[in-house]
Amino acid sequence: MTDANIRIPEEAKDRLAAIAAAEGLSLRAYLARLAQTLLTPAERVERAEEARAALKAWNGYAPTESEGQVLDSELDRRLARVTVL
């Protein structure tokens, strides 16, 4: 296992440590688990492509790029509304 020094604000470190402790983990273990669960941008693109292929195979749904952008905008609008409420 390799050690790494990461500079982050003290408040961020304290918050991460509190979250880790609440889950019964050390900060090191929590960060390692977090790194294993987050997707890279390339992995997100791959998953999205897999989901589109699965939808097309399942029910023929295959939105165009412009339809996808409209749907993304609508999702963003709805998410923004929920976070404001």
Image (cartoon, grey):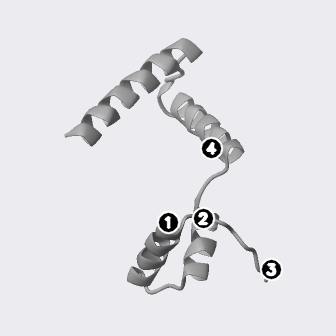
Looking at the image, is mark 3 or mark 1 nearer the viewer?
1
Secondary element type, mark 3: loop
- Residue under the image location 58 percent in, 16 percent down: 65
Please tell me which of labels 3 and 4 falls first in the chain: 3
Q: Which mark is residue 44?
A: 4
How much space separates mark 3 and mark 1, taking CA atoms? 22 Å
Kind of residue sitting beneath label 4: Arg
**Residue at the spot of label 2:** 8
Eye-nearest disc, 2 or 3: 2
Residue carrying label 3: 2
**Residue hosting label 1:** 12
Alpha carbon of mark 1 to alpha carbon of mark 2: how far? 6 Å
Q: Who comes first in sequence, dot 4 or dot 1?
A: 1
Q: Image check: 7 left or right of 19?
A: right
Amino acid identity at mark 1: Ala
Mark number displayed over residue 27:
none
- Identify which amino acid the numbered label 3 is placed on: Thr
Q: Quadrant of the N terminus?
A: bottom right
- In x, y percent, where is residue 53? 60, 33
Q: Is residue 40 above or below residue 31?
A: above
